[in-house]
Image: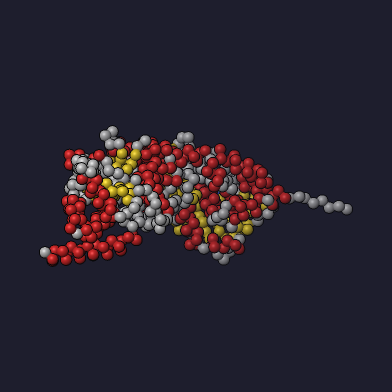
Amino acid sequence: MTKKHHLQIHSENILPIIKKWLYTDKEIFLRELVSNACDALYKVKLLKIGSEEEFRIDITTDKEEKVIKISDTGIGMTEKEVVTYIAQIAFSGAEDFVHKYEEAKGKEAFIGHFGLGFYSSYMVAKKVTLDTLSYEEGAKPVFWSCDGSSEYEIYEGKRDKRGTEITLSIDDDSLEFLEESKMRALLDTYCKFLPYPIYLNGQRVNDKEPIWIKPATELQEEDYINFYRDQYRMEEDPLLFVHLNVDYPFHLKGVLYFPKITRDFDLTAPKVNLYCNRVFVSDNCKDVIPNYLSCLRGVIDSPDIPLNVSRSALQMDRTVRSLSSHISKKVSDSLNTLFKTNKEKYLKAYEDISVIIKLGILEDEKFYERVKDVLLFQTTDGEWVTIDEILQPSQEKILYTTDPSHNQGLISLYKNKGMKILILNTPIDSYLIQSLEQKLNTKFQRIDASVTDHLIDKEKELIVLDSEGKTEATKIADYIKKALGLEHLEVEAKSLATEALPGFVTLDETARRMRDYFLTRDPKADTSYFGKKTFVVNTNNRLVNALTKLQQNDEELAKELTKELYDLSLLSQREIDPKHLNEFITRSHKVLEMLTEKVLQK
Ligand code: ADP
Ligand code: MG
């Protein structure tokens, strides 16, 4: 006699997949079951069959019995429904499962739609039972139980109240979920904004209002701030916020905040929380919002983000891409609005938000187009100006300084001529100006990059030639070049439009940028070969003139003073090589000594 065997491979395939592969975080079983309970309550509400007072979700943990129960007063299920929605899915093979997921994507959104939902309970449970009573007239209670194998039991249950109770017999590798504190923390993370009362061992766990689902017209500024304080307890108040609300072509609600940027602020740490119909999904919105906005704070809630597919698939998703560009648009719109309606507030926040604006400009051409009118620069006069205000036809190059505390001589020289000098002193600025130069077809130039016409006093130029065919200016330059004895240094004597400034060193803009770029990568790099320096001395300065005379009666002192003059210029431009500083100080002492002795001799 032969015995017939039944092949049962199809069913065994699924639960191990769930357990191992589907979610890396076991804890999301709670999110899934609680959101199913919420869906069930929401359906009751839609059918208008119950009173809202009785709506509740109860979660209990029992360490002795190693059991977690999740019960709701929702719509319940008939036997047929249990078989169709719960049982058949697990026993119809992986193929159908995927198919069901595909279908679910198109449906109008309830809280669920994470794909697997109910079956995620097998990530922590070795056995799951379900006690349910449907709202339908004359429905019989149903008891269903399955230990994760291919067999399940189903028979008439004893439940006498509408709703569903799910009992999880917790697996030995998941006993931590029996800790009340653990469960409380999880509920606080995933479920605190859910619309129906949730109790853990009798205590209410969710009483927070998700402000982002309210219309902006019903909210005051203080509501937004309070919500922020509640969510980010350790942080200073936000500078600005943006309320998002889209219904077409996708659903999206949310509130984004520009945080106060503190010293230890990490621009790369994503801080926007992602929700799906009020259920927390992830604290990493990286793929949903543009990189440059990922350091914002706040919440994005959209049922349209396919949450259960892998990260790489998420990046490719078209909805996600349009979400991302929509968010970027809303943020730039609100920056523009604030700039127009409350410039004072905008300026107050600007120093902090500018980093984000600048990053966005570098990363996203469209964002640049939208924020270019609210991109501001501070001038050395403390004034804030827009690009339009600095792009003047009379000024072919945009002048800037990387360090307004130094360079005073040059700065006031330009100021006297009515020129605006921008302060560009943050690391991102060097990238920003390169990008703006391309976008605006203009040039930025640091004030010490060259001697421009603005700096020259034409009337006092020493252009008279002597018998040897040399001007007075050339002679001064020759002397200083000789006294310094630096092979690669050019010296020019110019009639600067001031008497106060003895001179300054010019550094070619392109070469200097290159050098600075290398220095940011390696602060110790040898950059001496970058670009040529020119020492420009002022023929209208008394010290410069005195030096050329002094060489006739005290050559050594004149030479040392010339070197001193050059080093002081470098120092005032923050260009002195730190290695050279000791030599400078030693020489300064020596020069002072020589001068003092000279005075005493008299
Ligand atoms: P989804 O929520 O995405 O539909 P689930 O696997 O989470 O997938 O749930 C499958 C179905 O089982 C639900 O759509 C619902 O019809 C039913 N269901 C699950 N939990 C409950 C519950 N607590 N009360 C009533 N019906 C439920
Ligand atoms: Mg679900």
| Residue 452: % across, % down | 27, 41
| Residue 268: % across, % down | 43, 51
| Residue 132: % across, % down | 58, 50
Q: Is 452 on the left or on the right of 141, as rendered? A: left
Q: Residue at x 21, y 60 (%)?
A: 557
Residue farthest front in this picture: 467
Q: Nearer the viewer, residue 591 or 118?
A: 591
- Quadrant in which the C terminus is drawn: bottom left
Residue farthest right in this picture: 1
Q: Nearer the viewer, residue 277 or 447?
A: 447
Give the answer, above or below, for where 68 lies relative to 112: below
Q: Nearer the viewer, residue 463 or 185?
A: 463
Q: Residue at x 19, y 59 (%)?
A: 554
Q: Does residue 37 appear in this view? A: no
Q: Does residue 453 appear in this view? A: yes
Q: Nearer the viewer, residue 315 or 137?
A: 315
Q: Quadrant of residue 138?
A: top right
Colour scheme shown: secondary structure
Q: Residue at x 40, y 58 (%)?
A: 524
Instruction: Count the numbered circles shown.
Output: 0
Residue farthest left in this picture: 602
Q: Is 487 on the left or on the right of 39, as rendered? A: left
Q: Quadrant of residue 369?
A: top left
| Residue 67: % across, % down | 57, 60
Q: Residue at x 48, y 44 (%)?
A: 288
